[in-house]
Image (cartoon, grey):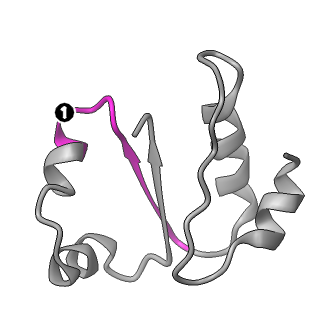
């Protein structure tokens, strides 16, 4: 899927999942996408031991605290 197509599909309160085999460029595509969006982004890497811990408390208050003024959450290696 081309990045421009992903950008067009992005909207509030929606999830986009990027699936693919290992080492095919998913992370690079995500980084390029981040460079094209105007919104502030929170980028979490699931391989980082701290990232899953941040998401462990599944409450609206926790997610609002994590996001702050950011409008986009990206989780790589989820």
- Taking 42 as reference, is 8 left or right? right
Q: How many marks?
A: 1
Q: Secondary structure at mark 1?
A: loop
Tell me the residue at 16%/83% (across/down): 61
- Taking 35 as reference, is 43 left or right? left
Name the quarter where the C terminus is drawn. top left
Taking the magenta stretch, the answer to whether it contains residue 32 is no
Taking the magenta stretch, the answer to whether it contains residue 42 is yes
Task: Tell me residue 75's x, y (percent).
Answer: 44, 49
Q: On the image, which quarter does residue 58 sit in?
A: bottom left
* Nearer to the camera, 11 or 68: 11
Name the residue beneath numbered marker 1: 49
- Taking 54 as reference, is 8 left or right? right
Magenta span of residues: 40-51
Which residue is the extreme one toward the top? 23
Tell me the residue at 32%/29% (across/down): 47
Task: Tell me residue 9's x, y (percent).
Answer: 77, 70
- Taking 27 as reference, is 55 left or right? left
* Nearer to the camera, 45 or 1: 1
Tell me the residue at 34%/37% (across/down): 46
């Amino acid at each position: 899927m081309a990045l421009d197509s992903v950008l067009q599909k992005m909207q509030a309160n929606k999830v986009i999942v990027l699936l693919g085999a290992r080492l095919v460029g998913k992370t690079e595509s995500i980084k390029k996408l981040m460079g094209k969006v105007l919104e502030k982004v929170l980028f979490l890497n699931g391989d980082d031991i701290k990232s899953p811990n941040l998401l462990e408390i599944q409450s609206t208050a926790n997610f609002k605290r994590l996001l702050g003024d950011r409008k986009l959450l990206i989780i790589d290696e989820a």
